[in-house]
Each structure stands twice: as C-alpha cells, then as structure tokens.
Image: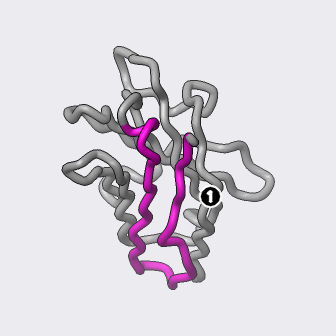
Amino acid sequence: QVQLVESGGGSVEAGGSLRLSCAASGYLYRSTRIMGWFRHAPGKEREGVAALYSGGGSTTYADSVKGRFTISQDNAKTTLYLQMNNLKPEDTAMYYCAARTGWAPSLPLKPNEYNYWGQGTQVTVSS
C-alpha cells in the first residue's frame, strides 16, 4: 500500500522551531523521484513550501520560508524532514508531504505536480 505519514506538528510561539517528519512506505520510496512539503491555511490555496530530489542534489524553497526552513531526508531515503525555525504566525497551516514518481528537470512547488499525498499534520504558531 502506498502511504505517506506525517508527524511532528504542534503549537509553538513565534520564534520557535518544529521538525516535521514524513515516513514513506516501501513501494513509494523505491519509485519516488521528488518529494515536497506543502501547506494549506484556511481561506488560502495549498502552497508549495520546499522540495528535493529523492536521489540527492538540489533543493528548492518558497520565498516565504527561505533561510528559515530546511528540507532533508534520511540516508535510507525513507523519511523526509522539514526543519522549521523562527516560526511566524503566518506559518500556521496544515502541512502535507507529497511524492512525485515522475522526473522533472526542475523541482516543482505546484500541488498538481505530485501524485501521492500524506494526511497532513497541523502547525499552529501563536504571536
């Protein structure tokens, strides 16, 4: 069964940090080419936060999180992480990890470029 399971969300004060994790099932991590993190806040569209190539190499970030968030994966490439530092109230959202099994010459941050999704983990940042 193809599965992505996020964890690590919670409530923090502005300036705090959280580390999100996303565990990928066996089939998925063998076939994934690109993985990304997205977020969806009430009243807003789902937006791409960060992405990386599963085989290693480039990463990309939304302008709103550059310098504060870091995307990474473990050596076995079965777990995706998002380290979030200096959190702001505007970072409050449901965060999702996503996987893309097709190759892309540049890392996409559009939701429709990904074909597998986790169930999400809530991040709430208070001022």
Residue drawn where x is 52% and y is 48% of the image: 97
Residue drawn where x is 51% and y is 83% of the image: 12
Q: Nearer the viewer, residue 68 or 79?
A: 79
Residue drawn where x is 45% and y is 37% of the image: 28
Q: Does dot 1 land on a helix, a strand or a loop? A: loop
Residue 75 drawn at (x, y percent): 19, 50
Q: Is residue 21 magenta?
A: yes
Question: Is the residue 53 above or below the residue 85 in the image?
Answer: above
Q: Nearer the viewer, residue 120 or 86?
A: 120
State which quadrant residue 52 falls in.
top left
Question: Is the residue 1 above or below the residue 87 in the image?
Answer: above
Residue 127 drawn at (x, y percent): 58, 82
* Residue interval drawn in magenta: 2-29
Does residue 114 appear left or right of residue 45 in this picture?
Answer: left
Amino acid type at image mark 1: Gly
Residue at numbered disc 1: 120
Residue drawn where x is 20% and y is 33% of the image: 57
